[in-house]
Amino acid sequence: MTSFGEPLCVLVHDREAAAVAKGTPRKQEGNAQRDGGGGPPILPRVSNALTAAGAIVVGPKTRLGQAVIERLPAARTALVARNHDENVALQARWPDRATIERDGLSEIVQPWSRVAIFACAIGSIHPGDDGLAHTSEAAARDLAIIRAAMNAADAKPVHVIFVSSILALARARPERASYAGWKLLVESELERQVTEHRDARLSVVYPGRLVERPVGVTARLSTRYDGLAATLVAVAHAPTARRWIAGVDARVWLLAKSVAAAAASFSIR
């Protein structure tokens, strides 16, 4: 397993995230991830194979992006700013991290032996709310940044970790259909970009509801931001590309949708 820089401990807050890093998810839970579900913490795991690997975070101003940043070594982490104002805000919040816009990617990536790109947010947070044109423009801008990062990496190994949504795996409610649809479109475009790079792979994580901290019985089935961040870093260390469902509520929702679809297929119309 390759570290993202100098010797560090990767503190994973649940056993499933550690299993992702090893590439051996727990058998009794299949490919389901229970990060943030209240599982007991485990001891830190330390990487022995240390090379000059680096990480790029797209969507660093989101709560998830900030949780991911906190788990990466400052010396080899670059935060993508969408404009000058965001660049200034990021520098104020994370003075020990590199902040970049599209220009400057080559200089950042050049000394790294491999690159992990954490796509915590692509385009609008709520696609469709600002109109189709704005949503498309925002997504195209972020996808262009990821493409530029892969081009800057040249022949170096690149691992893109995209945070999708469980809603993208089954029919969502009408008010959430555009959100789920955009997640699918972005995943498809990332898949295309990855195939065009000589040594790149794409992993996708499908979380359910994200919460800061669980309050109440229902919320305890959801995924914490810090728990999902731990999973994303673990997935980045995995030896192969992965598709991972994060959160008990996500698995329950998908199971309910599958049962409903199966029942509909046997119904007489």
Image (tube, rainbow, N blue to C red):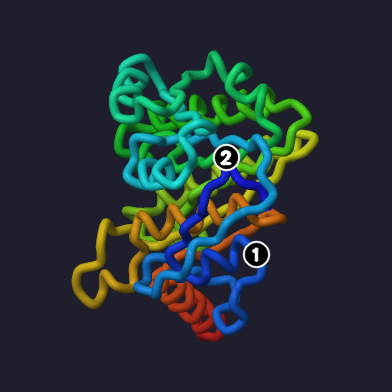
Q: Position of residue 142 (x, y in %)?
A: 49, 29
Badge 2 marks a residue whose secondary structure is loop
In front: 228, or 163?
228
In the rendered image, the vertical position of residue 140 relative to residue 200, given as above or below: above
Badge 1 marks a residue whose secondary structure is helix
Q: Please, what is the three-letter code of the amino acid marked with disc 1? A: Lys
Q: Residue furthest toward the left? A: 216
Q: Please, what is the three-letter code of the amino acid marked with disc 2? A: Glu
In front: 120, or 233?
233
Report whether 5 appears left or right of 97.
Answer: right
Question: Can residue 168 be seen?
Answer: no
In the rendered image, the vertical position of residue 256 relative to residue 240, given as above or below: below
Dot in front, 2 or 1: 2
Q: Which comes sooner in the sequence, label 2 or label 1?
A: 2
Mark 1 lies on residue: 22
In the rendered image, the vertical position of residue 91 relative to residue 29, given as above or below: above
On residue 6, which mark appears? Answer: 2
Report whether 200 appears left or right of 5.
Answer: right
Q: Position of residue 173 (x, y in %)?
A: 36, 61
Q: In the image, what residue occupies the spot 46% across and 70% down?
A: 42
Task: Report crowding for label 2: few under 14, some 14 to 19, many 20 or more residues within 10 A (C-alpha).
Answer: some
Question: Can residue 2 be seen?
Answer: yes
Task: Report crowding for label 1: few under 14, some 14 to 19, many 20 or more residues within 10 A (C-alpha).
Answer: some
Q: In the image, what residue occupies the spot 59% across and 64% down?
A: 20
